[in-house]
Image: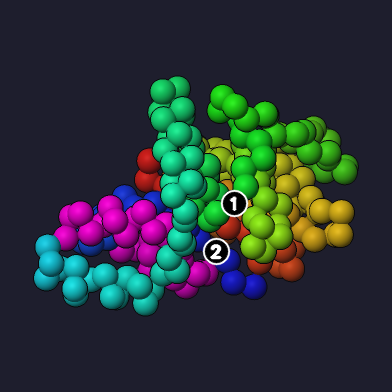
Amino acid sequence: MTKRILLDTDILVDFFHNQKYAKDLLTEFLLKGNLYISILSVAELRTGFTSQQASLLLPKLYKTVVIVNLSLEIAELAGKFRFEYRSQGISLPTVDTLIAANCQIIAVKGIDGYSTPPVLHNDGYGAQQTVTPDILAFDPQSKEFIVGIARVTREELESEKSLTEYDVLFDQKDKDGKPYRVVIIAPAKYASEVTSVVTHYIHRELWHVLTIVASKKM
């Protein structure tokens, strides 16, 4: 099953500035799944291009990634989320990612005006602790519920607690038995590793519900 990988603008900026780490990451990601960027990333990239560079580089980009559109309302909401998190000294691009994907945000940790995501039942995994995701959303287009969780340090990628969290997240289903989509955000330098860890750990039949968000901001 093909995996979905959504990229922060910063990684693409470094790619176009010939940064080796960014070139290596994108090459590896292209082998592992489909790449997505928000349409806002196109605007941010174009800001740094001359007309000649834009006419040369942007068409190549459009052939490589899927552009995710968003409405004015969603763009404003994304700004609100960024402001709220930045004021707390927190960067959690998962929120912006889901907004950019035109999802309906149901609950988010630490954002005024939104309830905390519900505790997810653990059906016997690991130490059987419950899991509270960073975000819960719904995609009206695909009719999927979405749970998102962040990984900040390398130790978190494959800790016993994290493995249990992966089990619980991928065990979630709606009332019709459809699996929730699982979004995992990680620093760009760990994105490939977390992809390998999770796809090795979960059953192959669930790979299609996994989206990895590679962020340079964390």
Nearer to me, 56 or 151: 56
The quarter holding residue 49 reads bottom left
Q: Which residue is mark 2?
A: 4
> Residue shown at 29%/75% (left/top)?
60
Nearer to me, 10 or 166: 10
The C terminus, quarter of image: top left
Name the mark on residue 16: none
Judged from this view, the residue extending furthest toward the front is 72
* Percent of width and height locating residue 183: 60, 51
Q: Alpha-carbon neighbours of circle 2 within 10 Å: few (<14), some, or many (≥20)?
A: many
* Percent of width and height locating residue 83: 41, 30
Q: Alpha-carbon neighbours of circle 1 within 10 Å: few (<14), some, or many (≥20)?
A: many
Q: Which residue is mark 1?
A: 103
How much space separates mark 2 and mark 1, taking CA atoms? 16 Å
In the rendered image, residue 39 lying in the magenta stretch gets the answer: yes
The quarter holding residue 216 reads top left
* SS state under label 1: loop
> Residue shown at 64%/62% (left/top)?
141
* Percent of width and height locating residue 62: 35, 73
Q: Is 132 placed above or below 94 here?
A: above
The N terminus, quarter of image: bottom right
Image: magenta residue range = 23-49
Q: Amino acid at mark 1?
A: Cys
Q: Amino acid at mark 2?
A: Arg
> Residue shown at 28%/53% (left/top)?
44
Nearer to me, 175 or 69: 69
Q: Earlier in the sequence, mark 2 or mark 1?
A: 2
In the rendered image, residue 97 lying in the magenta stretch gets the answer: no
> Residue shown at 73%/47% (left/top)?
169
Q: Is 128 placed above or below 1 here?
A: above
